[in-house]
Each structure stands twice: as C-alpha cells, then as structure tokens.
Image (cartoon, rainbow, N blue to C red):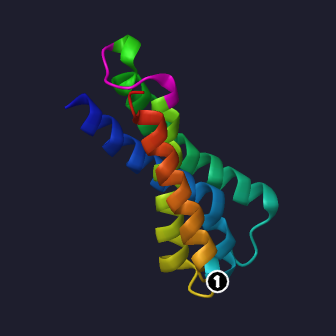
Amino acid sequence: MRGAKTILLLTISNMFMTFAWYGHLKFKEYDWGKNLGLFAIILISWGLAFFEYLFQVPANRAGFKEDGGPFTLVQLKTIQEAITLTMFMVFTIVFFKTEKLGWNHLVGFGLIVLAVFVIFKKW
C-alpha cells in the first residue's frame, strides 16, 4: 500500500514539476501571459514548485525503506525519473503539438525502463 501511495504522490508531484519547468513556455500564447517578465514567470514557476514539494516530500517519506516504506533511496530516485520522463512525454504530446517524439526518444525511454528493471532486480 505504501508503494502505491508513493508512486501516486510522485506522479502528482511530477505533474506540478513539469508545469513549473516547461509550462511557462506556453504563457505567451495567452493574453494574460504575453507581457510577463522573466521575474514574474519565475515567481509563477516557484509557486507551482511549492505544490510539487507538497507531494514529493511525503512520497519519499512514505516510500523510503528506512521510514517503513518498500523502496531504497536508489529505487525511489529511479521511480521518480521514470515518472518524470513519462509525464514529460505526455505533457509534450498534449501541450506542445509542434513537438514530435521520434523513435530515438522512445528507444531512449525504453532504455530507462530497462534501467528500472536492472535497479529493482534482486541479483
């Protein structure tokens, strides 16, 4: 149960992170965002990042083996990276329709999934 909770919280966290890091690139397409300066964009991104941390910190605490969770620190980081790339791919397809994911992106993502397998495998 703690494992599923960890993955859910990390997924929500990554939604906020992706919007904080890349969502501002779309602000200029909206009337309210056309004249925003860099400092305003940074403040908006920091505001989104605050919500990222509201989910990310509890996810890591719930999932960390030394706090009663099922995952080692390396496993937590690997899960987070896999979720980040998945979220980024979805975000790119949905919000940046001019961007195309090529075969090399998919192969690269597949290699990351393979890395998850290698890290979680009990050797």
Residue at the spot 68% in from the left edge and 71% down from the top edge: 25
85 is within the stretch colored magenta: no
Q: Answer whether residue 54 is visible to the viewer in this image.
A: no
User: Is 24 drawn above or below residue 116 in the view shown?
Assistant: below
Q: Amino acid at mark 1?
A: Glu
Residue positioned most to the bottom = 98
Residue positioned 65% across, 66% down in the render: 24
Name, please, the residue furthest toward the front.
Answer: 123
In this picture, is 52 found above or below 88?
A: above
Residue 79 found in image quarter: top left
Viewer-closest of 96 and 77: 77
Mark 1: few/some/many CA within 10 Å (<14, 14-19, 20+): few
Report whether residue 47 is seen: yes
Residue 60, by quadrant, is: top left
In the depicted structure, whether residue 123 falls above or below residue 6: above
Residue 9: image location, x then y, percent: 36, 41
The image shows residue 116 at horizontal and vertical percentages of 46, 44
Residue 123: quarter of image: top left
Q: Quadrant of the N terminus?
A: top left
Q: Position of residue 18 (x, y in %)?
A: 56, 57
Position of residue 33 in the picture relative to residue 111 (left or right) = right
Residues drawn in magenta:
68-74
Total marks shown come to: 1
Residue named by callout 1: 29
State the residue in front, 105 or 31.
Answer: 105
Task: Judge whether 25 appears above or below 1 on screen.
Answer: below
> Is 41 left, or right, of 4 in this rendering?
right
